[in-house]
Amino acid sequence: MQKNFTLVVTIIVLILIVACSGKRQDTVQTAFDMDSYANLFDMRQDPLSLARKTNPFYTDMGAWLGFGIPTDKEVAGFCGPYDLASRTWWSPVIVEVLSEEPKDNLALQRLGRDTVISYVDRLWMRSTYANGQIEQTLRSISASASLLLIENRSDRPFWISGELSKGSWKQEGMHLWTEQESGEVLMLSFAEGTELEVSGARYKAHLTGAEHVIAITHTVKDFNLRSATAVGKTIIQDSKELIKTQTSRWENYLKPNFRDELSSEAHRVMVKSVVTLMSNWRSAREGIKHDGVVPSHVADYFVGLWAWDSWKHAAALAHLDLQLAKNQVRAMFDFQDSAGMVADCIYPDSTENNYRDSKPPLAAWAVDAIYEVDKDKTFVAEMYDKLLHYHRWWYRYRDHDNNGFCEYGATDGTLEAAKWESGMDNAIRFDDAKMLQNSTRAWSMDQESVELNAYLQLEKQYLKKFATLLGRAFDDNQQDVVSPFFDKSRGYFFDRKLGGSWIEHFGPEGWAPLWTGLASKEQVMQVVKVMTDTSKFSTFIPFPTAAISEAKFMDRGYWRGPIWLDQVYFAISGLRRYGYADLADSYTAQVFDRLEGLKEQGAIHENYEARTGKRLKAPHFSWSAAHLFLLYKELKTP
């Protein structure tokens, strides 16, 4: 029996979510009005369209189902549910309010709607007719359940109906359910006494009275009819408390992070970032053993979890949902191999996991970000040996000449996978790289990367900190790993070939020593001159992935010019670390003000054009949201 589908776990998880999130912060700004941040995104969906999805869904709490707002205004119901794993519609509209009883072979007498609003924690719709109004509110209340509240503002009875995209309904008392070939089950639960009638893929129900609650539940595997009906019945009985719990959870995400001294535009960026992260939360499923945040629930190729995405997500989630932040880290280390390597990415189908390469070592940074919020040594103790094993893996399998400086590489000897390991898949600095074999299933590029070694040195500092907390010894030597990458003549940090020659391309790796705090003040002064040069990195949106002066710069070149907000954050945070707070604030304001769609209903994207701010790749992108959130947290701080 699926654990998410037991009554006890459903209730306990909801209580724990509020309890855990409620103790994260000491102060709450009472001026914050959560409902003032409505319609942040365009959530319109057309279930009949074959076009690729670009608009986000309403999905929350790790659910694998999403809902939307119908493009057809005559439809008085929410689109869906949409299966975010199989990318198919369970139903175009699972519950639609109708003005008259639906008849076989006759067109539906649609009520239509006059108002629909997407709030951060729910969808709301109002239909007005001659003698009254009907309001519908949809909320996720767990990873496997949603609650639809229908409020009738008149004495007039009404009808609801819904049709499956495939399959047929089965009935068990006040519960309708349908099962797919995969074993997944969708169930609708109604209050006792509801008049239900089922005919194949369609049902209809006659509703009287002022208020109606319908539970929509989803079982991924091991469906148990008795347990599922019990959960549906409990949701209906406890709906008022479940709604309060859901509202409280979102208030605990947003209120403690709300900074009254900042602008309304900045607040909007923060809230959009949080909504983006939470809508990309997926619960443990099949091969994925812990909950985590996927890169984007809108892009159909982002069904799994990626390593350095996960570290970045966790650093932001630490301020929102500590348990989710910890699980994001755990999910990747669940697949650490015996050598210490962490996979590039993992999927529900574990046979698709990618061990051709790893990703840049920011896991200890994520663990420290979590520790600094809750001071939980238990989690540090849980992760310490795994982090240490991963840290030492780099020096054993990615240091070709054993000189203490690591290179990006691959397990299969391909340059493609080695570039992926850097996270900057097609960066200009790798154009002339060659692969060298270190040992069995261990290859390196023939160049040492400045940011990789800066990250590893920062990781040593975290590991030493963790070891001290746990009363353990950490004996790895600390050394100056960034000065060998500093070219005094150019005033910037560059990668180097193993023979020592410079790889003379200006990229974001050059400010990694600032973000990690490893650069000297003298080096920083010169690097800042390059970063603030309008002919290099101080562009319309600051800090592109290649200086615009580079001959190979491309506005839409993925990692050859576009803006990636993780690198923007590292740049701005690095400036702030070394005392350039005003400059950091100015650049943050440019980002918040100039990214296309950020102030309107546009999604937060994977990357942007540096010279125009135009949106490029995947919409609703988590690490972009994570770093916008962190920029908000650090804005106007010393």
Image (tube, grey):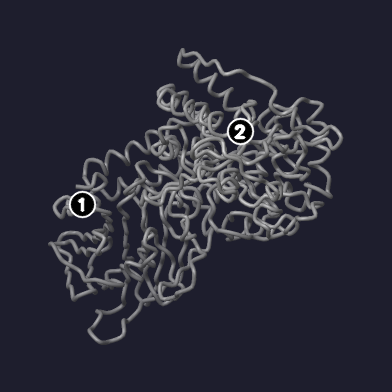
Residue 222, label in figure: 1
The first of marks 1 and 2 along the sequence is 1
Which residue is rendered at x = 84% and y = 50% of the image? 535
**Residue 518: image location, x then y, percent:** 69, 26
State the residue position of label 2.
400
Element assignment for label 1? loop
| Residue farthest along the right direction in this orientation | 489
Q: Nearer the viewer, residue 195 or 616?
A: 616
Which amino acid, by three-letter code, is at mark 1?
A: Asp
**Residue 595, can we see it?**
yes
**Residue 175: image location, x then y, percent:** 18, 61
Element assignment for label 2? loop
Left or right: residue 450 versus residue 24 is right
Which image quadrant for residue 125? bottom left
Identify the image quadrant of the C terminus: top right
**Residue 131: image location, x then y, percent:** 34, 75
Above or below: residue 372 compared with residue 45: above
Which image quadrant for residue 601? bottom right
